[in-house]
Image: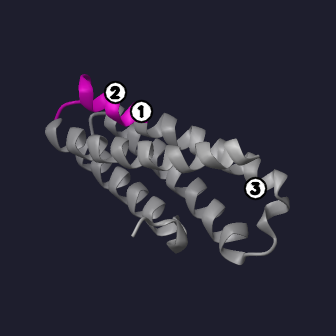
Amino acid sequence: MYWLIMAHNVMRWAILVAAVATLAGALAAGKKAADGWAGRAAQAYTVALDVQVLIGLVIWLLRSGWNHDAFLAFIHPGTMILAMLVAHFGRTLQKRSVPVGGFVAFLVSLVLVIAAIPRWAWPV
C-alpha cells in the first residue's frame, strides 16, 4: 500500500507540470486546433489525471474510503473526479478548435486540483 500512496504523491507533481504546459499550449495555439505540442501537452495532462484518479480510487477503496477524515473521504475524491471530467471537456473543446474554451476548462481543472490537495500535503 505504501508504494501506491507514494505513486499518488509523485503523480501530483507530474500533473502540475503537465497542467502548466497545457495552459501554455492552449494560449499558444491561438485560434487553431491544438495539433502540435499543445495537443500532446493536453493529452498528457488528461492521461495523468486519469491515472491519478485511478490510483486514488484504489487507495480510497483499500482504505475503506478514508472514513476517519471527511475531507479525504468525500471532498478530495469528488473534486478530483470533477477536475478530471473538466479536463476531458477542455480536451474536447481543444480538438474542436475552440482554444479559449479549452484554456478556460484546463484552468478550471487546475484550480479544482489545487483546491483538492490536502493542506498538510503542501510543501512548505
Q: Residue at x 27, y 34 (%)?
A: 97
Quickly name the residue at label 1.
44
Residue beneath label 2, please?
A: 40
Q: What amino acid type is highlighted by mark number 3?
A: Trp
Image location (x, y in percent) of residue 32: 18, 31
The local crowd at label 1, few if under 14, some if 14 to 19, many if 20 or more residues have their Cα within 10 Å, is: some
Please tell me which residue is depicted at 48% across the width and 50% down the height of the picture. Answer: 12
Horizontal placement of 17 versus 30: left or right? right
- Dot 2 or dot 3: first in sequence order is 2
**Among the 4 quarters of the image, the one containing residue 111:** bottom left
Q: Is residue 41 magenta?
A: yes
- The CA distance from mark 1 to mark 3 is 24 Å
Q: Give the magenta part as a residue range.
A: 31-44
At which x and y percent is residue 62? 83, 51
59 versus 46 height, above or below: below
CB atoms of marks 1 and 3 within 8 Å: no
- The residue identified by callout 3 is 60
* Badge 1 element: helix
